[in-house]
């Protein structure tokens, strides 16, 4: 923990920023692989009389990983506000590596019976716990280590890591499906994708060990601020994070949607993940920089409005043409709009919370939103498509959540340092 009485941020080097982004990316890579390989994992661990039932069982287990997100947020996120950001980032990263290795090595249902799905569920719970604490600690670190005029850019690196993880997962999936074929991919090929992520974990641990600590001793010793001082921020944040979570997991479902609902081949379906990951990785840093220059609210509202206009035509185009160009174009447009809006939302929430509760507060808000809606979104979409027979259900789901989130964006206050001063008594570091 930093003991400096001056309250100055520690100097942070480019490789240390990379360590945070890489660590966050690897954690989300392992977590998201489950969604991208849901069909193959369903066949391996949840055999059923029909493919749809197997997929639903796999997606329900994917949702289990969200149940422990709030617990991880409270435990690891809370400790990050008392002990420090760095140790909690190391713990969460180590846990995600253990869970990823377990996913790769767990025998199938055919080999060990009911023990297989039980082990997979336990591993998903560990992954959820780790990610629950990771988001708050790493985002607090980035905002505290950044110059005030570049907070948007630094915090946007949180989403760069996540989108790079989606891109890497898509590239790995595409390469495996092309090299070994769909039969081998379903039997054992998907395990290679998990092992690739595990192989990078030691590098991430070494890099994170070099990070400075951004939590000052005097900040950790401050009394907890009164809930009413940030209750409005918390409520609006929860709504915006919910809308963003649904949007993210609808986009992460595009590969499974294309394969399971539209019956497109895996080589085309995995291309959607690549388009989503590439656009998020490229445009998120631009969104962060623009929010530093023009403020958080314009970068929330304008892309969110564009997203709502584009949702229905994009999904209609995919369903009507059922071609690679339509899937990739629609995925790219939607993900770009989401990327611009989400970067501004995350930095706005983070810099609006007092430093004393920054990690734990953000972690809990993020975990609550994502545990309820991140874990249920893909299952609900698959179930609604099955019940209604309407392949446009993802569009309606996304439109409804986007409209509610837009209202919260309108009501939130501008938080960019150049535009507003913090309330008296709040420590912003």
Image (cartoon, rainbow, N blue to C red):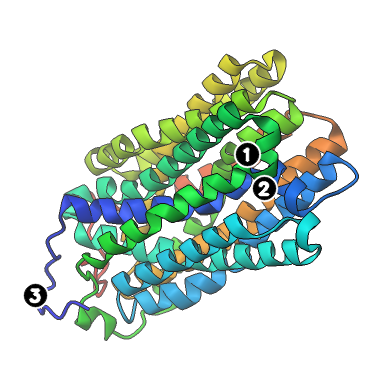
| First of labels 1, 2 by sequence position | 1
Which mark is drawn over residue 377? 2
Nearer-the-camera pick, 377 or 340: 377
Percent x, y of residue 373 = 63, 54
Q: Nearer the viewer, mark 1 or mark 2?
A: 1
Instruction: Determine whether the residue tagged by mark 3 lies in a helix, strand or loop.
Output: loop
Q: Nearer the viewer, mark 3 or mark 2?
A: 2
| First of labels 3, 2 by sequence position | 3
Tell me which corner region of the image, top left, top right, bottom left or bottom right, holds residue 5.
bottom left
Q: Mark 1 — residue?
A: 253
| First of labels 1, 3 by sequence position | 3
Q: Quadrant of the C terminus?
A: bottom left
Nearer-the-camera pick, 385 or 111: 111
Of all residues, the one furthest to the left in this rendering is 6
Residue placed at 33% from the left, 45% from the top? 296
Q: Are marks 1 and 2 in contact (CB under 8 Å)?
A: yes
Q: Is residue 240 above or below residue 173?
A: below
Mark 3 and mark 2: Cα distance apart in space: 45 Å
Question: Can I make out residue 86 in this image?
Answer: yes
Q: Quadrant of the N terminus?
A: bottom left
Q: Mark 3 — residue?
A: 6
């Amino acid at each position: 923990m930093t003991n400096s009485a001056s309250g100055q941020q520690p100097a942070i080097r480019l490789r240390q920023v990379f360590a945070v982004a890489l660590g966050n990316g690897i954690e989300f890579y392992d977590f998201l692989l489950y969604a991208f390989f849901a069909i193959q994992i369903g066949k391996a661990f949840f055999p059923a009389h029909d493919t749809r039932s197997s997929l639903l069982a796999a997606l329900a287990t994917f949702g289990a990983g969200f149940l422990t997100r709030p617990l991880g947020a409270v435990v690891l996120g809370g400790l990050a506000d008392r002990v420090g950001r760095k140790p909690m980032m190391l713990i969460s990263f180590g846990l995600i590596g253990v869970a990823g290795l377990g996913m790769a090595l767990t025998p199938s249902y055919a080999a060990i019976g009911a023990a297989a799905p039980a082990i997979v569920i336990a591993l998903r719970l560990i992954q959820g716990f780790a990610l629950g604490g990771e988001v708050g600690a790493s985002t607090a670190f980035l905002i505290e280590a950044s110059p005030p005029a570049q907070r948007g850019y630094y915090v946007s690196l949180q989403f760069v890591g996540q989108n790079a993880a989606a891109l890497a997962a898509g590239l790995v999936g595409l390469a495996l499906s092309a090299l070994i074929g769909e039969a081998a991919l379903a039997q054992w090929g998907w395990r290679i994708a998990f092992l690739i992520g595990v192989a990078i974990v030691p590098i991430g641990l070494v890099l994170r060990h070099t990070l400075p600590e951004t939590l000052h001793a005097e900040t950790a010793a401050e009394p907890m601020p009164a809930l009413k001082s940030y209750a409005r921020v918390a409520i609006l944040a929860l709504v915006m994070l919910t809308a963003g979570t649904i949007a993210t997991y609808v986009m992460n479902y595009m590969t499974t949607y294309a394969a399971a609902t539209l019956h497109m081949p895996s080589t085309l379906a995995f291309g959607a993940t690549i388009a989503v990951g590439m656009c998020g990785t490229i445009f998120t840093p631009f969104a962060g920089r623009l929010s530093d220059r023009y403020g958080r609210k314009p970068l929330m509202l304008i892309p969110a409005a564009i997203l709502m206009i584009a949702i229905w035509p994009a999904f209609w185009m995919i369903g009507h043409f059922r071609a690679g160009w339509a899937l990739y174009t629609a995925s790219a447009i939607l993900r770009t709009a989401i990327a611009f809006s989400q970067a501004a939302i995350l930095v706005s929430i983070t810099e609006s919370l007092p430093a004393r509760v920054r990690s734990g507060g953000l972690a809990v808000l993020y975990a609550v939103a994502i545990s309820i809606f991140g874990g249920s979104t893909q299952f609900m979409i698959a179930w609604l498509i099955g019940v209604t027979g309407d392949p446009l259900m993802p569009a309606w789901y996304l439109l409804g959540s986007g409209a509610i989130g837009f209202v919260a964006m309108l009501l939130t206050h501008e938080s960019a340092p150049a535009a507003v001063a913090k309330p008296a008594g709040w420590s912003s570091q």
